[in-house]
Amino acid sequence: MKVVILAGGMGTRISEESHLKPKPMIEIGEKPILWHIMKEYYHYGFDEFIICCGYKQHMIKQWVADYYLYHSDVTFDFSKQDRMTIHDSETEKWKVTVVDTGLHTLTGGRIKRIQKYIGNETFMLTYGDGVSSVNIRELAEYHRSTNNIVTLTAALVEQRFGVLSIDEKDIITSFREKAQEDAARINAGYMVLEPEVFDYLPEEDVYFEQEPLKRLAADGKLGAYKFDGFWHPMDTMRDKEKLEKLWAENRAPWKIWQ
């Protein structure tokens, strides 16, 4: 099953780093967050990736092109017509297709543009800026047990802020700190999709999360895989610093590989 990763956005909310590189190339533990996501899928046996690029897409292509070289012992013999010999390599057995889906293309348009690489197959889809401890194999098995065209991971996320109670006169009647009961389920990515999803993507550019998912929900074809474990996006520098700290302290819940 192919894994599609949306990696084309500009990452404006983390512009401290994204002005230099695409958001999925921002590093956690000296590795791009894109690498962390791919390692998660590879751990569960998914080794074929399609990366939907846009902003500074050449940097992702370069990273993929050089990945094998940078993770191997190499001899450069300039006396023999610049011969290069690869010795021991610890690289993963990945197959990666990097697609320039446009600089300003919305998520629905990016998915539509990689249809020819999917064919008539079930595939996976996630965002290139969030990590999770979700069991991807169990997610896939759950999807197969349903009639869903799309199953998304519905992660339970705590409310970040204090909660206001406001009456009909717009007067605040109470204020309290966030509590467990304020948690809500959100679309955390880590989706499984049937090829019929392309029928829900119009030719004009749209956000996948708006019209297409709303139509799927109205048709009863959008399922939720409820997940109460770790999921965290990297939207801001604060998010990056939190993920970096977890990694540095060897407490990263998404590191399920050895």
Image: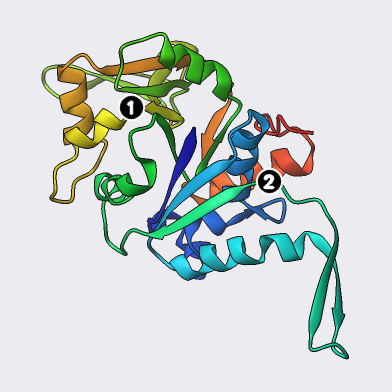
Q: Earlier in the sequence, mark 1 or mark 2?
A: 2
Q: Residue at x 80, y 81 (%)?
A: 83
Residue 136 locus on image (x, y percent): 55, 24
Circle 2: is it few (<14), some (14-19), or many (20+) Cα within 10 Å?
few
Q: Is residue 3 left or right of residue 187?
A: right
- In the picture shown, does residue 157 fall above or below 39? above
Residue 29 visible in rendering: yes
Residue 43 locus on image (x, y percent): 67, 32
Q: Residue at x 47, y 57 (%)?
A: 98
Q: Residue at x 14, y 48 (%)?
A: 203
> For the residues marked 1 and 2, what is the alpha-carbon distance in whole angstroms?
25 Å
Figure quadrant of the C terminus: top right
Inspect the image, locate mark 2, and give the three-letter code of the amino acid beneath it. Answer: Lys
Question: Regarding mark 1 in the picture, which secondary structure is present there?
Answer: loop
Q: Is residue 39 left or right of residue 214?
A: right
Task: Say which of 258 and 72 sits in front.
Answer: 72
Mark drawn on residue 93? 2
Residue 229 visible in rendering: no
Location of residue 189 (image quadrant): top left
Give the residue number, with chain letter if any, for mark 1: 194
Task: Say which of 165 and 76 sits in front.
Answer: 76
Q: Is residue 54 left or right of residue 130?
A: left
Question: Regarding mark 2 in the picture, which secondary structure is present there?
Answer: loop
Inspect the image, locate mark 1, and give the three-letter code of the amino acid beneath it. Answer: Glu
Q: Residue furthest front?
A: 80
Mark drawn on residue 121? none
Q: Is residue 238 left or right of residue 14?
A: right
- In the picture shown, does residue 218 fall above or below 18? above
